Amino acid sequence: MSETTTHPRVEEVAQRPSRNPSAQAGFETRPSVAPQPASRALSTLDALESESIHIIREVVAEFERPVLLFSGGKDSVVVLHLAAKAFWPAKVPFPVLHVDTGHNFPEVIDFRDRTVERLGLRLDVAAVQDYIDDGRLQERADGTRNPLQTQPLLDAIAAGRHDAVFGGARRDEDKARAKERILSLRDEFGQWDPRNQRPELWDLYNGRHTVGQHVRAFPISNWTELDVWRYIEREGIELPPLYYAHEREVYRRDGMWRAVSEVSPALPGEAIGRRRVRYRTVGDMSCTGAVESDAASVADVVREVATSTLTERGATRADDRISEAAMEDRKKDGYF
Amino acid sequence: MSDALFRFATAGSVDDGKSTLVGRLLHDSKAILADQLESVARTSAERGFGGEPGAIDFALLTDGLRAEREQGITIDVAYRYFATGRRSFILADCPGHVQYTRNMVTGATTADAVVVLVDARKGVLEQTRRHLAVVQLLRVPHVIVAVNKIDLLDYAEAAFTRVADEVTALTRELGLPGAHVIPVSALAGDNVVDRSANTPWYEGPALLELLEALPSLDEIETELEALRMPVQFVIRPQGALAPDVADPERFRDYRAFAGRIASGTVRVGDPVQVFPGGATTTVVGIDAGPLELDSASAPQSVSLRLADELDAARGAVIAASGSLPVARRELDASVFQLDPRPLVPGARVLVKTGTSTAQALVTAVHGRRDLATLALEPADRLEANDIGQVALKLSAELPVEPYADHRRAGAFLVIHPQDGATLAAAIVTDPAAPATGTPIRTATPEGATA
């Protein structure tokens, strides 16, 4: 029998007509519930962490074969850390999948392998290079391989019979992602239909799907870049070293510092110099730019991100600059 | 510094300047960064947005999809993030046209507050009544009515007072606890982030000040409600311990119930009862990952270790001793119909609540609410965007409770059993029938996805 029949709900919050002489202080002096409980609100990070762990656990409970897209980038590292907490002391109960463009930073691949080893996980790699080698995909004229990831990703999802695919996408990254659901239904072609999304109500996630469909699950949808960095700081989470300030041979292109490498050589006229830089996002070497920075520690980065005047994608991703709807178009085509 | 999360939704009718208000709120609270602003300014200029050179169409900041920007309308709920020194905010921006109920309901179910926009020149409209009706039915803790475009009425106090009086009358009529009414100009920025010198007769807070000060839902409810934790699954690592766990011997027989606390607080040593069945035991440990806690409250995700080995699986609910939910096979509910296919008596659906899913039969449609008055009118079916009252029969006993008593225990989804679409959002409205002494037959609800 339920005991909670009396429920002192929000009662009689004062109307706030303009001429109410006590209006100025009204909302502070009139408690919206009586008696006012001591503030027990979770901190922002605790509230976000709790929501994300709940989502990860729901997906694992309701799906047969989840997988986590893991690139070694900070967002997927945070999702993996949350998963480790969600199932502790048991092992994370799903494998990880990396769509390898072949243009990754070597220190990120090294970090990826060490992390997977430490947590005892299985790593599947879908290599864009294999597709180029056997002619299923062609290298683009601009050398960028990010748009080539979609087919190897969808093939790997089908081959692994994965019905749920975790990703580290956040809604604050882009205007199109701001409309994404936490559980996002995809058809056989991995396509996102933004005009026909399931409404998401309370914290009840509907992951039902039919044969051939799968669900993309975004546990850190509600986190901002700053939340991610504050959490990395609080939890002491290790990241690939290129997220922190270091000396690197770079040249200037499209208003960004690009690393000199075999896959991203400087063109004639692009002056190469050594600069102190760090990466705000870590993707394909051929399209990810670095920012000049002295932020060598997590605390430095938190300070830098808190005061940055550019978004992370605006500052560092050539591929999102192509048009105002670049991200939306790639999402519709089955990209993340 | 209090660093808490506050979720709010914005709602309004077409053309009352909601996107502009949201853009203004984000811009003036410095949540818009230079590259976003530059891109919006460029597009504003290309589209010939009025005003002096460099004027910005703030609506472009929030309309995320190509179709929206081309048609100048907002299609779907968009989520925005910004923070002040006092709080972090999650804003669900709900478009006001066409599928207004669908979008409003989506935004309102997770909101600590709803900001309803009213055009000062038009006053309370049909749509305003509908928005406030949804807010009332879903029991959103705080209602803020932003009376917009006050600049177009020369900041006249009388114009504002007239709308404020209409709002007051409406909230009384709908049985709402009350609303905070603020005169604003989204376009000019009056009373959005800072109090405006243009409205000296208004002595209340600016919109952002209010959002920073109102208590969140969990702050209000945590201390008032009994413990409920729906079990997501049991963590029992046995051979599959994480390789980085120190002292593996200690965890060989580890067994804990994973879940997110839906209401109340749990402390180590608390007596608890487990639904179904009602077995009583004691909490011996609360784990958050490798961290051991003395207590935890809604909405924390934890793992509870219990003194006795109970047979509880996904779908079970751990409740404060003496407050065990009553097993329900039949219930009455308010239903917010979202799907274009009408809900009719005899429909076979799935009901998902907490961590349980069960088959259900719609045994009756009692009627549809007239959203202007909330009165129940006769209807034999619920169409998209209708809010109605139905009776359901469940295939298994579920621990649902009246939404008015336990928000998370009273909310459920109505799901199409074949294609899996979310047909409706629903809340339990009737209490369980008094116990009649018949033995309670329990069933473990089906929870897995086909």
Image: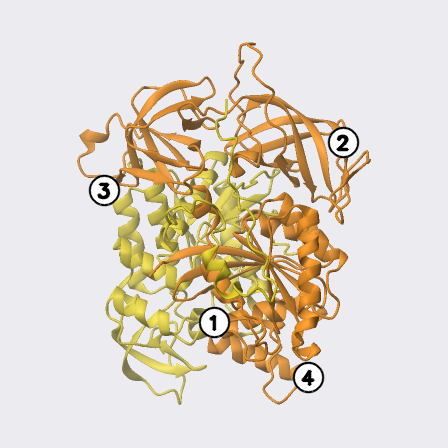
Chain colours: A yellow, B orange
Tell me the number on the disc at residue B48: 4
Local SS, label 3:
loop
The answer to which of marks 1 and 3 sits earlier in the sequence is 1
Q: Is residue A312 above or below residue B255?
A: below
Between circles 3 and 2, the one closer to the viewer is 2
Q: Amino acid at mark 1?
A: Ser
Q: Amino acid at mark 3?
A: Asp
Q: Residue B446 falls in which quadrant of the image? A: top right
- Circle 1 residue: B29
Q: Residue B116 falls in which quadrant of the image? A: bottom right
Residue B207, percent from left and from top: 54, 66
The foreground one among A311 and B343 is B343
Local SS, label 4:
loop
Given contact means CB atoms under 8 Å apart, are the residues at marks 1 and 4 in contact? no
Measure how far apart labels 1 and 3 are at the Cα level.
43 Å
Residue B330, percent from left and from top: 64, 23
The answer to which of marks 3 and 4 sits earlier in the sequence is 4
- Circle 2 residue: B366
Between circles 3 and 4, the one closer to the viewer is 4
Q: Residue B450 falls in which quadrant of the image? A: top right
Given contact means CB atoms under 8 Å apart, are the residues at marks 3 and 2 in contact? no
Looking at the image, can residue B416 be seen? no
